[in-house]
Amino acid sequence: MNKNTIPVGPFHPLLEEAEYFNLVVDGETVVDIDIDIGWMHRGHEFISEQKTFTQSIYLVERICGICSTSHPLACVHAIEDVDNTEIPLRARYIRTLIGELERIHSHLLWLGLAGHFIGYDTLWMWSWKYREPVLQMFELISGNRNHYNMLRVGGVSRDVDPEKIPGLTDVLDMLDKKLIMIAKAANDDPVLRSRLKGVGVLTHKDALDYCAVGPTSRASGVPADVRKSEDIDAYSLVDFDVIVLENGDVYDKLIVRVLEMLESTKICRQCLEKLKKVKGPILNNVKNISAGEGIGRYEAPRGEVFHYVRTDGTNRPIRHKVRAPSYVNIPTYAASCVGLPIADVLITTASVDPCYCCTERSLKVVNKNKQPYQIDLLKLSREKTERIRRETYGG
Amino acid sequence: MNIEYVFFLLIFPGLLFTGILGLTVGWVDRKVSARFQFRVGPPFLQNFNDFFKLLGKETIIVKEGVHSLFIAAPFIAFAVIVLISTMIGVALFFNKGFGGDLFVIMYLLMVYSVMIILGGSSTGNVYSSIGAAREMKLLLADELAFIFVCMVPVVKADYQLSLEQILNWQSIEGAFIGSVSGVIAFIVGILCIQAKMTLPPFHIPEAETELVEGPFMEYSGPPLAFWKLNHFMLYVVLPFLLVLLFLGGFNLHGLGILWAVLKYFLIVVVMIIIKNTNPRIRIDTALNFFWKYAALLGFIALILAVLGV
């Protein structure tokens, strides 16, 4: 049989990021998938070790543009874990509120993109329309639409104005209605169902074997959720359910996300209710961090994000390690994509909501004499371009 | 050679009329789709600007592949579309024959799809070749149902194949949409032209997020401009064909003009609504749908037409 290779990436209109899969196809069926990450050069961990703790929180906020509060949340959890810092109750509610609002906007963004990937541009535009009020809520709370700069070691930087709470609750009510509408539309549309049902199944065993996290695992019947299993922020004080479905196909991943958004509005409403009553400080002033190490976990919209910080008593981390949820979710393609037609493979890859800019880390190679840094990378890249040019055009 | 025929072919209802109306209706489609999705949409002249801008761009030819076929395909397809539009238009507006009957139109529509397949597979690009393969499967899928749909008016018009005879029959006996078989065939026909135009949910060969425009991926400059123009001209040709076959053609006297516009836009609007409310389906689902359901419905319509219902 004639086997072709279809490169998806490094630049492909499927995602706006630099991803690269080689699909080995036999006709239209994908018989093997080769996942190749490493097309983005970041260096956040390295830079973070040059910064103070407060600065590195701002820095890790820039790891991801979509789940931009999950990374700093995990980071402050890690730094607070070194000394077991107490967080004021009001700050815990504000952190939970911000985290859950972010989950809503991230899931709506994914829903839109998923619509776009299966050629359903109306769904795309509609869900992004309903994402807009969430961003406006963020602007009301923090002054920013996307990078909120809300977190500090020991609390949060801005308080939620009690006068704004009724307006925020109204937006949540509106969102509830629209989310239920979207869920019903997804459930009733026979074309959408036939397109997504039974496609890209990640079995319960595979989800466990590949250590899948977040909605990817919860759609396969693995109830992995850091919000329930760990005592973080105010999650133990609010009432919510972890959505777990059994089939593991793309359709279940969609439904898990839609239902999670409804749970998130529930949590947000409870937090706003509490913020009316709970008074007190929002920031526990932390003077210094002692030597030691700490881990921080948070349930980002895509799954568990993990930060590790080692300190030596100075005001900066000596090691900062980030593990993003996509890092464990992307390898599940090997289990869920093989044997499907191309059209299904691409929506399956998108269904784990991969975030390559979260996942990718620049590799630092240390020579004995010198550390290759920006200049050397530039030189290497120029040499390679020159070589390719010679090979292609001769001379 | 009759000068009248040159006029038919080049100006009205051929090249110029179909081209301008196609680009305009293409704008209507883009604008209405944009309003569906809470967007603003492009300005009126956008499609014209796109076309003329592309004409001035460089044509990049891929090293591998068959160059002559690659360049010829869009222009042959263009010629085919102009010919179909002239044949349908002359029958609709002047109630005359232009040297071809319904079979010729069905054949030429297939040639258009074949040109997409040839153009796409002559590049040596893996996305293009998969797109061409999908176009081939889609053609096989919708063709059977389309043949049944085209046969229904032929049977109802007492087995006459020429377009003007079908129109004359309808002007005496009433439009074929008034019968059960006509309604069924019309509905199946709309689905078929949706697939022939590769509009959603049948934009399987182009599939932007999978195959990066599929067969058209390597095209640039004037050949791409002509592919785009061909696509927009189909917005005129295929609805006109349905109007001719089922809705009794156009009566261009007095209020008839309003009716004519309404008939045409009824079909276009239905196409736009289908386009905006459906995701892209898989090629096997499309094959399944057309052979199992659409072709069956078309066949039932044909049987009913034979029985005179």
Image: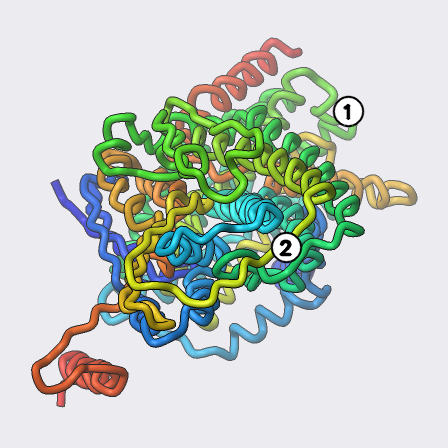
Where is B142 relative to B87, above or below?
A: above
Q: Give the amino acid type for the residue marked by disc 2 in the picture.
A: Pro
Furthest residue in direction left, as rendered: A368
Which quarter of the rendering shows the C terminus of chain A? bottom left
- Of residues A370 and B282, the one nearer the viewer is A370
Q: Residue at x 28, y 27 (%)?
A: A203
State whether discs 1 and 2 lie on one chain: no
Residue position marked by numbered label 1 in the rendering? B174
- Where residue B156 sits: x, y (%)? 64, 20
Q: Secondary structure at mark 2?
A: loop
How far from the left and from the top, in percent, is residue A149?
56, 64
Whether residue A264 appears in this view of the structure is yes
Bin the neighbour count of mark 2 within 10 Å (Cα to Cα): few under 14, some 14-19, many 20 and up: some
Q: Position of residue A283 (x, y in %)?
A: 57, 58
Numbered disc in front, either 1 or 2: 2
Image vertical order of residue B243 relative to residue B307, above or below? below
Frontmost residue, A254 versus A227: A227
**Element type where label 1 sits in the image:** loop
What's under tag 1, amino acid-wise? Answer: Gly
Task: Please give the chain letter of the residue carrying mark 2.
Answer: A
Which residue is more in the foreground, A377 or B210? A377
